[in-house]
Image (cartoon, rainbow, N blue to C red):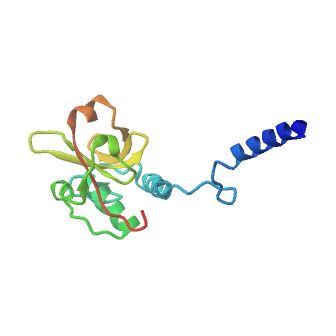
Amino acid sequence: MRLLIVPVLLVLTLLGGCSSSPRYGGFSAPDPRAALRSDLHEQYRIWAGTPYRLGGIDRRGIDCSGLVYRVYRDLYGLQLPRRTEAQADLGRKVAADELQTADLVFFKTGWRTRHVGIYIGQGRFLHASTSRGVVISALNNPYWQRHYWTARRLPLSGI
C-alpha cells in the first residue's frame, strides 16, 4: 500500500503545478493597447515624410499640434483643440514613468515654444519635427529629455 501512495502523490503534485496558470482557450488575454499601437503605426505610415509647416494640417505640411489634432480626430473621433498649449490642458496628468500608448507628451523647446507628440510605446513618440517632418523619435534622446515638460492621458472609449 505504501508503494502506491508515493507515485500517486508525485502525479498529483505534477498535475497541480500544471493547473496553477489560468488558460483562456489556449490564448492569452488580449492587450487593449496593442490595437492603439497598431493604429498609431499606421498613422505614421500615412504621415511619414510630410514636411513641417506651421499651422498646417494636411499632407502638404503639418505642425505638431496639427498632427495630434488629425490623428485623434481620424482614429478616435475626438475634436481636440488646435493649439499645443490647449492640448496640454486636456485629460489627466501622467508621470513619465507611467506613459501608455496614445498618451500625449509635451516639451518646452523655447522660452514660449511648446511641442507635442503621441507616445507609441517602447520609449518612442510620433510627432511633426520642425527639421524632419513627421517622424518617430526616442524620449531618451538627450534633446527630448532636456526639454520634456509633461504628459496627458485622454479618455479613449474601450481602453
Residue at the far top: name it. 142
Q: Quadrant of the C terminus?
A: bottom left
* Residue 53 seen in the current view: yes
Residue 97 left/right relative to 14: left
**Residue 72 picture quarter:** bottom left
Q: Nearer the viewer, residue 92 or 3?
A: 3
Q: Residue 60, percent across and down?
A: 33, 57
Q: Measuring 63% from the left and 49% from the top, which residue is drawn there? A: 21
Q: Is residue 135 above or below residue 37?
A: above
Q: Residue 27, percent across and down?
A: 65, 56
Residue at the far left: name it. 111
Count of marks placed on residues: 0
* Residue 63 seen in the current view: no
Q: Measuring 43% from the left and 52% from the top, which residue is drawn there? A: 44
Q: Nearer the viewer, residue 47 or 51?
A: 47
Q: Residue 24, percent across and down?
A: 64, 59
**Residue 55 picture quarter:** bottom left
Residue at the far front: name it. 1
Q: Measuring 31% from the left and 56% from the top, which residue is drawn there? A: 67
Q: Residue 125, percent across and down?
A: 36, 45
Q: Nearer the viewer, residue 16 or 30?
A: 16
Q: Measuring 90% from the left and 40% from the top, which residue is drawn there? A: 1
Residue 8 left/right relative to 138: right
**Residue 141 picture quarter:** top left
Q: Is residue 148 above or below residue 91?
A: above
